[in-house]
Amino acid sequence: MSQFEQKDNSGSIFSNNKKAENHPDFKGKCKVNGVEMEVALWKKVSAKGTEWMSMSFSEPWVNPNANVEQPAPSQTTNDSNEMPF
């Protein structure tokens, strides 16, 4: 099965299973000018009773603990007779 690739300047949004009141009602992904973004929408009601939606865009979330490359240990020795450079 091939992986779906978002076309440029388009996106998809889905109903979100909210776990807290401040979580978005809908979430999705889009690609704008070649940049992939995440989209969040909240349903709102104005003081006059007009329904509207608030929207935010963000860079895709990346788990900071996933596949973190550790720097290689230094190969230098610290003998008293050796110069460090």
Image (cartoon, grey):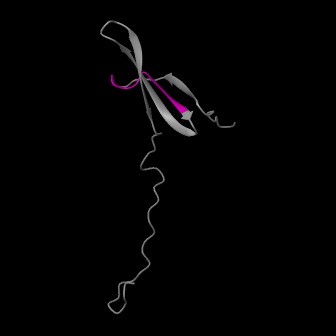
Residues in magenta? Answer: 20-30
- The quadrant holding residue 74 is bottom left
Q: Position of residue 48 (x, y in %)?
A: 32, 6
Residue at (46, 39) in percent of width and height: 59
Extreme residue toward the front, this view: 33
Extreme residue toward the bottom, this view: 81
Residue at (34, 93) in percent of width and height: 81
Q: Position of residue 26 (x, y in %)?
A: 46, 23
Query: Is 8 positioned to the left or the right of 18 in the image?
Result: right
Observer-nearest residue: 64 or 13?
13
Observer-nearest residue: 35 or 42?
35
Q: Position of residue 80 (x, y in %)?
A: 32, 90
- The quadrant holding residue 78 is bottom left
Residue at (44, 27) in percent of width and height: 40
Residue at (42, 49) in percent of width and height: 64
Decide whether residue 28 is among the magenta residues: yes
Extreme residue toward the left, this view: 47
In the rendered image, which quarter contains the C terminus?
bottom left
